């Protein structure tokens, strides 16, 4: 698991998350912080989730697109 301290702009944490077959990339605040990880899920694993530790979060906007 990767982590980085949050950088808030106007009280919000803006994330751009790209997930493909074997990697996850998280860009925050227009690329000021970038986390990249390789993942190797078990066969048939089709679930993704996002968690918050030590508080709460509100998702204001969520867009899901297929990568081509």
Image (cartoon, rainbow, N blue to C red):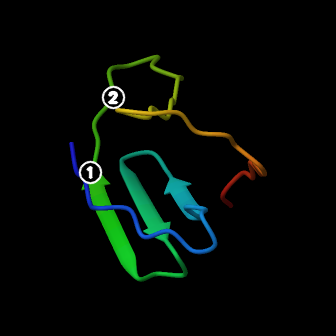
Query: In the figure, is residue 37 to the left or right of 27?
Result: left
Of residues 67 and 2, the one drawn nearer to the viewer in this rendering: 2
Q: Residue furthest top?
A: 44
What residue would you read off at disc 1? Answer: 38
What residue would you read off at disc 2? Answer: 41
Q: Is residue 52 above or below residue 23?
A: above
Instruction: Specify few, some or many for label 1: CA neighbours under 10 Å numbering under 14, 14-19, or 20 or more.
Output: few
Q: In which quarter of the image is residue 13?
A: bottom right
How many numbered callouts? 2
Query: In the figure, is residue 68 to the left or right of 34?
Result: right
Of residues 43 and 58, the one drawn nearer to the viewer in this rendering: 58
Q: Position of residue 40 (x, y in %)?
A: 28, 36
Q: Look at 58% across and 39% down and name the residue there.
A: 57
SS at mark 2? loop
Q: Look at 21% across and 42% down and name the residue there.
A: 1
Q: In this view, does 40 lie above or below 24?
A: above
Of residues 8 and 31, the one drawn nearer to the viewer in this rendering: 8
Q: Quadrant of residue 26?
A: bottom left
SS at mark 1? strand
Q: Quadrant of residue 4?
A: bottom left
Circles 2 and 1: CB distance less than 8 Å?
no
Q: In this view, does 56 lie above or below 60?
A: above
Q: Where is residue 65 in the image (x, y as percent from the top left)?
A: 75, 52
Query: In the figure, is residue 59 to the left or right of 47?
Result: right
């Amino acid at each position: 698991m990767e982590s980085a301290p949050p950088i808030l702009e106007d009280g919000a944490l803006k994330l751009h998350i790209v997930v493909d077959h074997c990697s996850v990339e998280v860009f925050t605040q227009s690329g000021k912080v970038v986390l990249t990880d390789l993942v190797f899920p078990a066969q048939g694993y089709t679930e993704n989730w996002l968690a918050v530790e030590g508080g709460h979060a509100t998702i204001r906007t969520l867009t899901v697109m297929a990568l081509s």
